C-alpha cells in the first residue's frame, strides 16, 4: 500500500504547475522575474518537460534532425547522439563539427577527436556538469584523459560490438536500456537518459510511458514525497503519480497546469520532476532531509535567446507551436 507524505507531495504538484507557468511566461516574452516564488526565482530548475530544456532542444533540432537524417545510416544517428551526450555541451559539439564536419561513422576517429579536445580543454570546459558520469571505467584506465576514455568506450563497447545492431532492432524501450546498461561504463542513470535521447530519433520509436527508471535525484524526491511504498518499487511511485495526477492536482489545489502543446506528461517528465521537487524541498522543507541539503546551482539571470522549439516529428505537436516572443532585459534584479 502506497502512503504519501502530503506536506511534501503537494509541492510536487505545485512545482509542476508553477515551473510550467514560468515556461509559458518565457515563451510569451514576459519580464523577469517569471515567478513570485523566491525559491524558483533564485535557483536553477529544469523544465517540467525534459525535451524543453535547452540542451535537449539542441540535441533534437541540431544533432538529430538538423542534418538530413533520412540520408544517414542508423548507426550514424546513434553515434551522433551518444557523442553529444557524453559531453552534453553545445559548445563542445559545435567545436568538433566545425573542425571535422558533420559527425558520422566514417569520420569518427577517436585519436583525432581526442587530440582536438585536448586543445580545447586548455581554455574551455568540454563537459557539462549536469550529469554524474557513472559506471566502471577500470579497463580503460590506461587512457590519460577522461574524454579519450569515454570516446574509446563508445567505440569499442557499442559501435564496434553487436550492441549497435541490438539497439536498432530492440523491441522495447526497456530493452534499449538493458543493452546500454550492459556496457561497463554507463550505469543505471545514464542508460535510461540515453535511451530517452535515442528514442527522440527516427531509429527507435517507443512509448515513453512504457518504461521508467528512477535516477538518484528522483529517488530522493520520492523518499520525501512518500512515507511508505510498501512492496512497491520507486518506479511504481512514479507510475502511481501519473495514474493519480488529476486526483492530487484537485486535492492540493493546483489545477491550472497547462501541458505542452497538447502533449501530456510522460514517465520521463514525471521522473525528472521528482528530482526537481527534491531540490525545491531542500529550501521549502529543510527539516525533511534526504542526503543533499542545499541547491547547488543558482539562477543568475535569464538567457534572453529564445528557443525555436522543435520536437520529434513523431510526436505530432510541431504544427501547434507558435514562435516564442523575444524577452527583454528589464527587471533582472533577483529577490
Image (cartoon, rainbow, N blue to C red):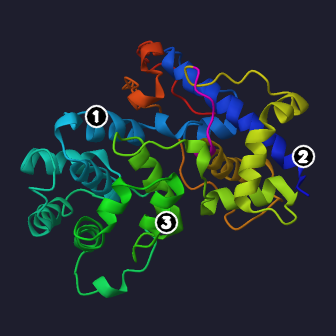
Q: Position of residue 56 (x, y in %)?
A: 41, 41
Work out whether mark 1 precedes mark 3 in sequence or the reverse, and give the earlier one. Answer: 1
Looking at the image, residue 108 sits to the left or right of residue 191; the answer is: left
The answer to whether residue 326 is above or below residue 239 is above
Q: Position of residue 275 (x, y in %)?
A: 64, 52
Q: Position of residue 228 (x, y in %)?
A: 88, 62
Q: From which residue to which does the magenta span run?
A: 262-268
Judging by the rendered image, the residue that carries numbered circle 3 is 178
Residue appearing at x 59%, y 20% in the figure: 262
Judging by the rendered image, the residue that carries numbered circle 2 is 6
The answer to whether residue 47 is above or below residue 296 is above
User: Is residue 7 on the magenta stretch?
Assistant: no
Q: CA distance from mark 2 to mark 3?
A: 34 Å
| Number of on-image labels | 3
Judging by the rendered image, the residue that carries numbered circle 1 is 65
Asked whether the beta carbons under mark 1 and mark 2 sit within 8 Å of each other, the answer is no
Amino acid at each position: 500500500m502506497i502512503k504519501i507524505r502530503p506536506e511534501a507531495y503537494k509541492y510536487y504538484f505545485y512545482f509542476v504547475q508553477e515551473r510550467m507557468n514560468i515556461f509559458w511566461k518565457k515563451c510569451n516574452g514576459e519580464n523577469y522575474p517569471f515567478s513570485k516564488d523566491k525559491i524558483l526565482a533564485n535557483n536553477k530548475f529544469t523544465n517540467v518537460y525534459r525535451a524543453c530544456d535547452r540542451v535537449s532542444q539542441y540535441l533534437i533540432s541540431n544533432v538529430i534532425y538538423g542534418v538530413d537524417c533520412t540520408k544517414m545510416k542508423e548507426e550514424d544517428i546513434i553515434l551522433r547522439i551518444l557523442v553529444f551526450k557524453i559531453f552534453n555541451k553545445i559548445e563542445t559539439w559545435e567545436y568538433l563539427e566545425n573542425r571535422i564536419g558533420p559527425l558520422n561513422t566514417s569520420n569518427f576517429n577517436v585519436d583525432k577527436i581526442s587530440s582536438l579536445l585536448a586543445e580545447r580543454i586548455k581554455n574551455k570546459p568540454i563537459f557539462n556538469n549536469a550529469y554524474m558520469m557513472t559506471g566502471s571505467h577500470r579497463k580503460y584506465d590506461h587512457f590519460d584523459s577522461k574524454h579519450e576514455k569515454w570516446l574509446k568506450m563508445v567505440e569499442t563497447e557499442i559501435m564496434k560490438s553487436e550492441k549497435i545492431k541490438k539497439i536498432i532492432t530492440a523491441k522495447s524501450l526497456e530493452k534499449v536500456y538493458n543493452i546500454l546498461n550492459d556496457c561497463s561504463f554507463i550505469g543505471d542513470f545514464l542508460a535510461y537518459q540515453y535511451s530517452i535521447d535515442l528514442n527522440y530519433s527516427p531509429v527507435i520509436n517507443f512509448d515513453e510511458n512504457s518504461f521508467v527508471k528512477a535516477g538518484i535525484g528522483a529517488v530522493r524526491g520520492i523518499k520525501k514525497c512518500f512515507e511508505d511504498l510498501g512492496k512497491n518499487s520507486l518506479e511504481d511511485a512514479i507510475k502511481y503519480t501519473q495514474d493519480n495526477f488529476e486526483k492530487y492536482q484537485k486535492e492540493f489545489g493546483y489545477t491550472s497546469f497547462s501541458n505542452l502543446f497538447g502533449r501530456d506528461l510522460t514517465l520521463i517528465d514525471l521522473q525528472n520532476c521528482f528530482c526537481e521537487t527534491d531540490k525545491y524541498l531542500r529550501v521549502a522543507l529543510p527539516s525533511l532531509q534526504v542526503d543533499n541539503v542545499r541547491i547547488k546551482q543558482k539562477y543568475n539571470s535569464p538567457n534572453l535567446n529564445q528557443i525555436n522549439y522543435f520536437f520529434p516529428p513523431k510526436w505530432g505537436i510541431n504544427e501547434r507551436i507558435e514562435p516564442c516572443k523575444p524577452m527583454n532585459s528589464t527587471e533582472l534584479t533577483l529577490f
